[in-house]
Image (tube, grey):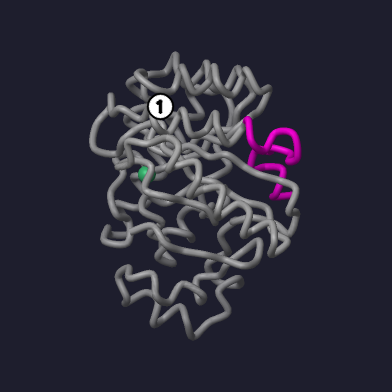
Amino acid sequence: MHSPLATGIYVGVGAAAGLGLAAGGYAYAAMWPASRIFGRALIAPPRPGELALTFDDGPNPPCTPRLLDVLAAHDVRATFFMVGRYAQAEPALVRRIVQAGHLIGNHSWSHPNLALSTPGRVREELARTSDALAQIAGKPVLYFRPPFGARRPCVLRVARELGMTPVLWNAITSDWSEASPDRIARRLMHKIDRNHRRGMATNIVLHDGGHLALGASREPSVTAAGQLLAHYKPTHKFVTLDAWNE
Ligand SMILES: [Zn+2]
């Protein structure tokens, strides 16, 4: 479900072949210069000394507060792609994240596979989330990560129309189903170091929540984030995604 790899800062829709998503849109998109019609998705720039920690599927009361403590202990800011209905249920936690200086993004209202959703549903999922987050945080939401990475052209177009830059990633592991923080951290380090050798920054995905319900346990992910911070802080600069979208 999670597999896109990219070698440049942006990857166009035309480069999405092989992702195994609903194929109809891609056959069409492949005939066109992706950047002109659908916009592109932000991944990571050619800045090998930079890392972006991103956390999906929160906010999540059992895990997000400890994650905020871990980030604060390292004086690092991260990016949180939030599920709209969780944000609506936990506005105080959203505000705590924003007040700590982290960047927040839209991860849809209910985390459906948007590649299988109607255009009307896509718009509703994204607009409702942006409205709720803007209301809670007091500022507009400028970044969007599609659930499951499902970036059908319609999804990217709607995100752009709502003023958001679509974001993917170039380092992920199945942290949501892995009990060992050591293994999560080690697998991500392997990808980070590989991107570094290729001259690229790394856009790292971890999860502080679960997409099925509020309250998921993501302790191994939070601990792994702490291990990545301890390992890379001396040699790398941790940034939020807006640093790569200038
Ligand atoms: Zn997600």
At 24% from the left and 31% from the top, the residue drawn is: 213
In the image, the segment drawn in magenta is: 230-246
Look at label 1 and name its amino acid.
Pro
Residue 9 falls left or right of residue 180: right
Residues 47 and 179: in front is 179
Name the residue tied to disc 1.
59
Q: Is residue 18 above or below residue 88?
A: below
At 45% from the left and 78% from the top, the residue drawn is: 29
Where is residue 199? Give x, y as percent: 73, 61
At 60% from the left and 17% from the top, the residue drawn is: 99
Q: Is residue 1 above or below residue 131?
A: below
Based on the picture, tell me whether residue 225 belongs to the magenta stretch.
Answer: no
Check the image and name the residue furthest to the bottom: 31
Where is residue 94? Give x, y as percent: 47, 21
Residues 230 and 3: in front is 230
At 38% from the left and 69% from the top, the residue drawn is: 19
